[in-house]
Image (tube, rainbow, N blue to C red):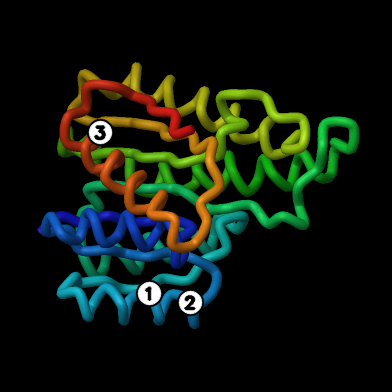
Amino acid sequence: MKTIAIVGAGSGLGLSIAKKFGEHGFRVALISRNQEKLDSLVAELNKSGIEAAAFTADITDKAQINSAFDAIREKYGFIDVLEYSPIPSVQNLAGTLAVNEENALQQFQFNVLGAISSINEVLPAMLEKNTGALLFTTGGSSIHPTPMMGNVGIAMAGLRNHVLNLNTELSDKGIYAGHIGIGVWMQEGSGVQDKIAEIWYDMYTKRDKPEEYIS
């Protein structure tokens, strides 16, 4: 069986992605700070016949990310797919004119450094095997500048740039790197999360484009 690790897993998009890949035979490793939330997600996936396990980590803490991925490798072995989609807290958003060193750095650590730490946990093994996929989901400000998301947009645009560069560097090595920018609100029960999960699985399977924008 293949394994997907979902970083920043939650009851919305993360769960939808877990279900979609799980329906196609993947085991699911869920990473988040909240153990109670993770346990609930694992229970729901197990009820659907999907093998899943929870691993706690603060994505701004490199040591915690390392420990989580060590535990995933110990349990499941090779990680075939990394999906990174943590959602920034509304309290941490800053409009363009309110951007300062502190709130810009916080988003850079959350969106970019957390992603880089996660990539470094899985990419060496993928390069050895010449197979794997790196999937990154961000908000629409990663592609289209949005003043109200000033500090977030700076970080997400940087992550998007890195992902597209990864796709260029890795495409001839059997490894797919892709990005989805979401320009719609993902309200509970809207079905948007399930649609995005379907798009992700299609992109992962076909590997014919590195990016999609959902509006």
- Label 2: which residue? 37
> Could you tell which of marks 2 and 3 lies nearer the N-terminus?
2
Residue 41's label in the rendered image is: 1
Residue ID at (41%, 42%): 119
Query: Image quadrant of residue 60?
Result: bottom right
- Quick check: can you spot residue 67? no
Q: CA distance from mark 1 to mark 3?
A: 24 Å
Residue 213 versus residue 52 in the image, above or below: above
Q: Nearer the viewer, residue 142 or 65?
A: 142
Instruction: Report the amino acid beneath label 3.
Output: Met
Judged from the image, the secondary structure of the residue bearing numbered disc 3 is: helix
Residues at circles 1 and 3 in contact by the CB criterion of under 8 Å: no
Instruction: Report the amino acid beneath label 1.
Output: Leu
Quick one: label 3, few (<14), some, or many (20+) residues within 10 Å? many
Residue ID at (31%, 77%): 44
Q: CA distance from mark 2 to mark 1?
A: 6 Å
> Could you tell which of marks 1 and 3 lies nearer the N-terminus?
1
Query: Image quadrant of residue 38?
Result: bottom left
Quick one: label 1, few (<14), some, or many (20+) residues within 10 Å? many
Query: Image quadrant of residue 40?
Result: bottom left
Task: Give left or right: position of 12 versus 2.
Answer: right
- Label 3: which residue? 203
Instruction: Report the amino acid beneath label 2.
Output: Lys
Residue 51 versus residue 177 in the image, above or below: below
Judged from the image, the secondary structure of the residue bearing numbered disc 1 is: helix
Judged from the image, the secondary structure of the residue bearing numbered disc 2 is: helix
Residues at circles 2 and 3 in contact by the CB criterion of under 8 Å: no
Q: Nearer the viewer, residue 23 or 122?
A: 23
Residues at circles 2 and 1 in contact by the CB criterion of under 8 Å: yes
Q: CA distance from mark 2 to mark 3?
A: 28 Å
